[in-house]
Image (cartoon, rainbow, N blue to C red):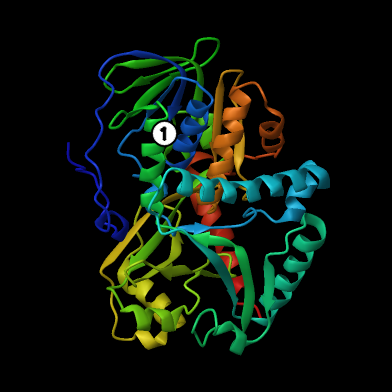
Amino acid sequence: MKHEDAIDSYYRASLSVPPLRPSLQESVQADVCVIGGGYTGLSTALELAERGLDVVLLEARSIGWGASGRNGGQVCSGFSAYTDKLEAAVGREDARRLFDMAEEAKTIIRNRVETHDIACDLKWGYYLAAERPRELRDVEAWQEDWARNYDYHQLKVVPTAEDSRRHVNSPLYIGGIHDAGAGHLHPLAYCLGLARAAETAGVRIFEQSPVSRIKRGASPGAQTESGPEVHAKFLVMACNAHLGQLVPELARTIMPVGTYMAATPPLGESRAAELIPTDEAVADLKFVLNYYRLSADHRLLFGGRVSYSTMMPPDLPRAMRRSMLRVFPQLAEVDFDYVWGGYVAITMDRAPHLGRLDETVYFAQGYSGQGVSLSAIAGRVLAEAISGQAARFDIFARLPHQPFPGGRFLRTPMLALAMLWYRLRDLMP
């Protein structure tokens, strides 16, 4: 079968994507049914299969069709939520456990890439660039907090514009902070590699199998739109930004946010190295941030902008190019070969949302821009909980999550107004 709904992205164009797997044609039994074929679903399914459970995974479209195959490829440290928020929610001791699990997530990725021979261009090194003195003050406090309270010593403050140019050759930045423990990868290649690893471990994956209804309680299950069902002992909801109204109480706690990527033509090895000499992932320190890195074939992959509706922003390529040229004015004659977008799910406080709907139905969602790394540990703790060891999962589940105000129809304009405040704050010195 062909990928008729494939996204025209650089990621997909750069890979030999396998044919679609069959859809679910008849009802089946399993120990666990996982709904969603992105990082969370695949990580959970792989972890469960490695523990000896029989797993069926249902994907509405194709593996990696959502954010897992379209994102910026950044493997980040920590959480989008600040550590003081985590400490206020669960206390210093459990906040430290959460931080350690976020660190474990990066180790999981490293080990999976090596163990399963996933060719996804995984590289380490991450630079966060500051435009304003306030941002430099913030990163100094950040480095001190993580070193003192979380025993994380991979951060190094970059104090001057001259030092910053050794990381990213842009006149825009006055300094920043370097994270030797974070990195970047080809997101779709990693996702497809996870799928192969899961199938090798025994997971049955069905694509083009959207779920229309779930059954909770002692005998949970999932019914597909075409009729066949999966009957299981446990159900895992791993739909994230594409949950829709399948579980309304979960949908209220996340907001799908559009974010966008662009890829230049190949720049050549030397010119690409002039832009980012360290070949690291780069992001700025704004709330609505730009993020970028180099591809294996020496393109600049540039991400940024957000939208809070289902509509793509008007004149997106031109707007993305303006943002790129603000960072790299030396690319004045360079246009884009590809521009694409997708949705990530954010929560009110930017902390990931893991929990149970009841004793047999689990979920994970709302990574708020850090799903590449955090989905790895989410999959592991979900598998631990289903296997009867829920201590680490329960720390995540203790994080409080409020529904977005305004209901289904008013929450988008309300969030847009809130984001306007953050945009104005980004302009403060």
The three-letter code of the residue at mark 1 reads Ala
| Depicted 283 relative to depicted 60: above or below | below
For this orientation, the residue located farthest to the left is 1
Residue 366, visible in the rendered structure? no
For mark 1, give the secondary structure: helix
| Depicted 322 relative to depicted 6: above or below | below
Q: Quarter of the image holding residue 336? A: bottom left
Residue that appears at 69% across and 72% down? 156
From the top left corner, tell me how far across and down residue 80 is, in percent. Answer: 62, 55
Q: Quarter of the image holding residue 314? A: bottom left
Q: How many marks?
A: 1
From the top left corner, tell me how far across and down residue 394 is, in percent. Answer: 70, 31
Residue 25, visible in the rendered structure? yes
From the top left corner, tell me how far across and down residue 364 is, in percent. Answer: 55, 36
For this orientation, the residue located farthest to the top is 218
Q: Which residue is mark 1?
A: 198
From the top left corner, tell me how far across and down residue 19 is, in percent. Answer: 21, 39
Residue that appears at 65% across and 54% down? 78
Q: Quadrant of the C terminus?
A: bottom right
Q: Nearer the viewer, residue 69 or 115?
A: 115
Residue that appears at 51% across and 88% down? 171
- Classify residue 11 as left or right of residue 89: left
| Depicted 303 relative to depicted 8: above or below | below
Q: Quadrant of the N terminus?
A: top left
Q: Nearer the viewer, residue 223 or 158?
A: 158
Residue that appears at 46% across and 15% down? 232
- Classify residue 122 as left or right of residue 64: right
- Number of residues whose C-alpha sits closer than 10 Å to that of mark 1, classed few (under 14), some (14–19) or many (20 or more): many
